[in-house]
Structure formats: structure tokens, C-alpha cells
Image (cartoon, coloured by chain):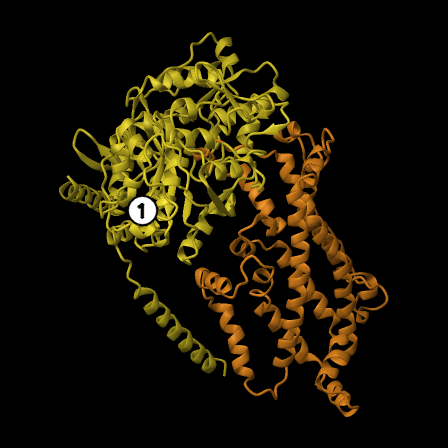
Chain colours: A yellow, B orange
Amino acid sequence: MIFKPWRRVATATAGLLALTLIAACSEDPGESTDLSENKVGAMATYGVGDQFKATEALSFSTLYNNHTFYPLKQDWLFWSELTKRTNVTIEPVAVPLSDYEQKRSLLIGAGDAPLIIPKTYHPQENAFVSSGAILPVSDYIDLMPNFKDKIAKWNLKPEIDNLRQSDGKFYLLPGMHEKPTQDYTVLMRMDILQELNLAVPKTWDDLYTVLKAMKAKYPNVYPYSDLFSKPNPTGALLNILGSAHGTQAGWDYQHATWDPAAKKFTYTGASEQYRQMVTYLHKLVAEGLLDPESFTQTDDQARQKLANGKSFVVTGNAQTLVNNHRPDLAKTLPNAKMAKIPLPIGPAGEINPFPRLENGIMISTKARESKNFVAMMQFIDWLWYSDAGMEFARWGVEGVTFTKDASGKRSVTPEVDVLGLNPKAPKHLQKDFGFYNGVFAYGGTPDLVRGFFSPEELEFQKVMDARQPRVVAPPAPLTDEEREQVSLWETPLKDYVTQNTLKFALGQRPLSEWDAYVAELKAKNSEQYIDLVNKAYERFQKSNG
Amino acid sequence: MVILGTKSDAPQTRGPVDSRGYRIFRVVNTIVLIGVVIVTLFPFLNIVARSLSDEAYIIAGKVSLVPRGFDLTAYKLVMSDAMFWTNYRNTVVYTVVATLISIVLTTCYAYVLSKPQLRGRGLLVGVALFTMFFSGGLIPNYVLVTSLGMKNTIWAVVIPNAISVFNLLVMKAFFESLPTELEEAAAVDGLNTYGILLRIVLPLSKAIIATMVLFYAVSFWNSWFSAFLYFDRQDLLPVTVYLRNLIAGATSAESAAADADKVQAAATFQAVTIVLTTLPILAVYPFVQRYFVRGVMLGAVKG
């Protein structure tokens, strides 16, 4: 009795669906290069160093990642000063940071996306390229003089090329750094180091010696007990250890690694470098230097072990050091001294692995039809890429939130706190003024990016600056069909690599089985994968030179 | 009030003195249930203890059931955040309005479906069942709600989920179990359909309505997803999204890797928010529960 009406409903639904599909497909995105209809409010001449100011009041909708620490406020100086300087009002569509990506996909999918979509991490934009919902911004960078200028001045062309899709265009305006600012490294109890009369380790092999000495003195302690077991086990440690071995692991795992000598891509999880990295990790676990629970415990558990002197070394960054470990230790072990050590060097030599591009902005395709399109691109160029705009987004207004001394060094005014620089100040640069906001402040020159760093952290960065940046892989963009094919292979491959990295490290699988493991990866299409990537690389070389 | 499982409730056929087997059963039963109570209660008491403790003790893993280093600053901090209260008020308003709408709609629909003489009843049941197994999907739903102009209004969260098919079927079964003679008698006495529903059926259905209120209220109180989808302004969000965001801001290691300006929310702060959010709905439970037990007994006598 139930089934009959069901069938009727199902038929009706199917019919409706078909209609919607036909309607959706019949739209044809017009590709016109004529911008004469889109110049309302734009400046006739706008170049590097110019202050952008729209010729009439404009407003642009912007997706806004609402941070827990500095929730959106309407009365921020950022909004009013931005409008005063540029004649542009940003209409934020506030999304809780917990589910920003989901809402972004939904809004883009539903055709309801704001014009400006910041906080997009490459390659997240790939998912939206084929739908035509986001703009190939590379077609319009002539409207953005500061953006072009920074690429040329900072030699970012290889990095930018890496963003290109198979059509040769890129769809994301990334945050750009003049110099890489590596933050994650190994944090260590310096007092234990002193107690054992050891020097700060320079290489991963030195680190092994130090851990060994710690274990000899404190046999009941696992000297290294790591945080960040999610989303994949010891993601942060694998990340820095992998880059030191010339491969990519942990948080940074990519299936294809560029081999500059052979001029082709190889499968990361099956490479010799990856094997060396796993071997090192296994050595640490086997000799009781790295806590096997590092791969499974929660961050809180690892924090507690460190706070209670049950471990001495952990992976982390300036934030976790200053906000977590030091206050924890101050309460439990007041004599402990915890510090960052310069990123240990591995077989890959003295490199600074940090990428120079960070998350960036996508533009909705519908913005192209707006009569204010040119003005919007100029506005984005000013706020995110001009020296004045970057200073404004990060530091705020000179005389109000910061001052500059004769040498040009900036410091926050005494009434303003940020990152605990003026803990007693009544106002906070992020919470009360809306500057140094993750949505608007990305990248820049070292003096901007590192403006709030402590002397200790600047010292760390000085060591890191002396190292070479990592070689950027050439672009090898896949077509839509290839990407679909590859995405079927990716998850099983990645799971398998992660699982086996763990098994090899923990000794559940002997390293003598490495060749068998590589063969198993092949059975999971790792070779087809790499062939596809290498073909894409050659194709791109041919068509884009 | 009658409590299940006590002596007065024991089957009378076993005689005035409880059999040995039954006594053993009661002892085992009590022990097992006390175990269940402890298991359920422990995490909650732990959160309460954490919310009242100094953070150093939490990080050191020294807080289990008793608060250590008694500290109320976290409560003061959370309570001084205006957005927390705005979102809290939203949750209360959404829950009350949504529950009301849901109860009215579900009752009406279920009552109608419980009448075998209704023409097209199969189709009506089919329509409801269809939505139980198939949904339009996220984006079509979003487009629908947006084009109806409900985005950024309370209706976006209270209307689309108003009828839960599962609850509807439970209620339909309950109405079907009511003796038809009662309604026939009422009809003879001159009541029309609405009169029968309002004066005869509903007063007899307090138990099922109390249960439904509980089901709906709890699910609306805890829900966050539709609010997250349809609201673009933080002053419209319910407190669940506030809480979710707070915890995500503190625990997402992966985004912390990418976001250098992330600052960890204190462990105490999270516990306080959890306590403040769960307390009211916990407080509602016992009252509804009382209704529920009494109502069930009432139905048993009538049968």
C-alpha cells in the first residue's frame, strides 16, 4: 500500500531534478575581456604606492571566518578606518571558524557566495574550479599592480605557477611572504640540557644523542613525548622530520614529490628519503627515546606529561611554547626552562622548509558582472598586497594603535595589548580594534610578519633565514577527469602510508619488509598515480613553456 | 508516586513474601543500575569539577570529581561575554518556539493518520516515510530556505525540521491504541472532530505529549547545524554554535598549524560553557519524566 504513492513521489522528484539540471547546465559563462562596463567607482590610474580610494561609496560582501579569540564586532576601528581610507565598506558574512570550510562549500554550491572569499588554503580551490563558480583571477592581475610587483620583487613566480590549473590559470590570490617564517620546531627543556652538560643539538643525529643522554640519566622517562596525534599521528613531528629528509610527511603529506635531479615526480611514501625518515623514527621508538603513545595520545595528555617532568622534548611552535608549556611548567616545575631550538638539520641540508605562500582569496565569478568589478580588484590589491594596506591590516593606525621610531621600527602603543606584549593594557589590538585579523592580515615583509615577535623568536628566525628555501615543485595540474581518477586512489594510498609509517616506527612491521610495502603501494596504484602526475607535468611544460 | 521495581510493584502471584530468586534479581539489578548511574554521572561531575577548578590542576590531570583550587573567575568571564547570553537567549527562544510548532504539527498529523477511514492515508504516510529515507541534500535545502526568504530568521531553524517522522509514527501508534468507543461516545454527545481531539483525545495523551516535548526540546536545544547553515550573523546563533566554536578554537591542531595567531581557550573556560549550556535541559528532565511515568500508569489502568 505504501509503495504505490512512493513511486509517484519518486517520479515527481526525479522529474524535478532533471529540470533543475537542465536549467543549471544551460547557463553559459561568457568570457569577455572587455572591462569598460565594470569600472564604476574604480580609480582611473592606480599603481604601486598609490592609496586606493573608490570614487564613490562601495560595499563588497566578504566571507568572514569568525575567530573565537576575537569575535566580530561592528564598532572595530578596522571597519571605520578602512571605509575612511578606501570609501569601501566590507559586508561580512560571519561564519564560526569551527565549520568555515563547510559553509564555504555550501554557499559556493548554492550560488549564494559573497564576492570575496578569503581564508582558502591551496589546493582547496580545486574543488570549485570546474563548477565555474570562482573567477580565474590570473586573467585580471593587470588590475592589481601591487600583487604583480610583489611577485616580481620577491621572486615568487615558481610558487605562483604551482597554483595553476590545467587551463594554465590560477584561481586563488595567495598570501605572500618575502621570506619563509618557519614556526614549528623542536621544543626542549634547556635546564635538562645544561644539567647533562650538552650543547643544543644542530642536526637530527645530534638530537638523537641528546635524547640518548637524557634517557641514560632518567631511565624511567620517555624524553620525547609528542603532541598533535590528530588528524594523523605525530603530524607535526613527521612534518619537520620529513622536510629535513627531503620528503613530505605528516601534516604536509603530498603524494608526489619533485625530484630535481631526475626532473620528474616520485611517489613520496615509497621514496628512499621517506624510508630514511621512517628508519630514524623507528630508532627513536625502539630505544625508548620517543614515547610510543605520541602516536595516539591527546594533546592534553602530552602537555600533562611535559608539565609533570615525564618528558622533556616536544614538537611545537612559539605559540604552544609561550601559551601552553611555559605557563604549565611555571605552575608545576618552576625551575624548568623550555625553549625552541633551531630546526634540526637532516640529510636534505640546511633548508628552511616553510612555504612562502599561505592561504588566500577566491573571488566569486558573479563579481565579474558587477559594474564595480575593477574597483573591487583594486581594493583587494590595496588591502592585501600594498605596503600601506598590509601595515594597516596588521598594525592598525599610526598614532592610535602603533608608533614608529626613527629607524622605522613599529611598536604597539602602551594602551594596546597584542600577544601579551602589554598585558596590562586596557585594549587589545585584535579584540577591540579588529587589526591583526586572520581574515585580512596575511604575508608581507619580515618586518611586518615578525613585528610582534619576541627577541628570542627573532633570534630563532635569524638562524632560519640563513638557510635556503625549499625547492618549489613545478606545476603539474591535473584535468578534471584525472583529478577524479586520482581522488579515488588518494585516500587508500594515504591511509596505507600513514598506517605503515606508524607500524614501521613502532616496530610492528620490521623495516626489512620495506620492499614488500612498496610493492603493496604499487598494488594500490601508486605508480599509475605518479605516471599521471608526470604526464600532467610534461603536458603543462609543452603548452605553457 | 509509584516507583518501578519496588516491592509494591512485584507480581502478586508470587505470594506475600518475595521469592529468593526475585530478591537476588533485585540486588543484582540495583548493583548494575548503580554502576550505570556512576558511568553516566562521572563525565558530567568531572566537567562540573573542572569548571570550578584552577587551570593548573586540570593541566596536571589532578581533577576528577572534586574541584581543586576552587576558582570562579572562569564563570565570571563567560557570564560577562554579552554574546554568550545573546546566543543563550536565542537557544531558549528557538527551543520553545520550535517545540511548540513541532508538537502542534506532529499531533495534528498523527491524529489524522490514526483514522483508518481517512482516504489517501497511505499516501500521507508514504510522503512522511519518504522523507525519512531520502532527503533533498544540503544545497537544495539551502536554496529552498533562502528563496523562501527564511535565511537569517527564526523560521529557518524552527520550520524545516518541525516534524520528525519517527516521533510522528510513535504518536500515530499511540492514537491508534486509544479505544474508538470513547470518540464515538463523544460524537454521540455532540462533539465535533476538533472537540473530540481537544477535549477527549489530548487529555488522554498527556504521556505521549510529554514524551514528545522531551524528545523535541532536547533535540532542538542540542541542534546547531541548521542554525549554522542559515544564519550569517553571530547574534542570531544558538549557544551550541558558540560552544562548538569555542572548543574548535582551542583544539583544532591542524588549523593551529596554519594559523599562527590562534590562541588556546582555557580548559576551564570550556568546562564552564559546557556546564552552563547543559544545566537547563538537565533541569527540565526530571519534571517531564514525572509526567511520563504517571501517564504510562494511567494508560495501563485504562487499557
Residue displayed at 42% across by 58% down: A110
Total numbered labels placed on residues in the image:
1
Q: Estimate the x, y position of residue A338 in percent, counting from the top left.
A: 52, 18
Query: Which residue, as the protein is rendered here, is positioned at the far left?
Result: A542
Residue that lies at the very extreme toward the bottom in this rendered image: B188
Residue A449, x across and y down, in percent: 42, 26
Q: Which residue is under mark 1?
A: A490
- Residue that lies at the very extreme toward the right in this rendered image: B16
Left or right? Give the position of A405 relative to B7.
left
Pick the residue in front: A1 or B274.
B274
Judge left or right: residue A192 versus residue B178. Answer: left
Q: Is residue B118 above or below residue B285?
A: below
Crowd tier of the residue under label 1, counting other residues whose Cα lies within 10 Å: few below 14, some 14–19, many 20 or above = some
- Name the secondary structure under disc 1: helix
Asked if residue A151 can be seen in this view, the reply is: yes
Q: Residue furthest top?
A: A197
- Residue A222: x, y in percent? 49, 23
Quadrant of the image occupied by residue B165: bottom right
Q: Is residue B40 visible?
A: no
Q: Is residue A525 above or below residue B168?
A: above
Is residue A307 placed above or below B231 in the rendered structure?
above
Residue that appears at 42% across and 74% down: A13
Q: Three-letter amino acid code at disc 1? A: Glu
Q: Which one is in front, A34 or B21? A: A34
Please give left or right for residue A18 compared with residue A97 in the image.
Answer: left
Instruction: Classify the position of the N terminus of chain B by image quarter.
Output: bottom right
Location of residue B188 (image quadrant): bottom right
Which chain is mark 1 on? A
Residue A148 percent location from the top left of the image: 29, 34
Quarter of the figure with the C terminus of chain B = bottom right
Which of the two residues, A412 or B278, is positioned nearer the viewer here? Answer: A412
Give the residue at x 36% y 43%: A377
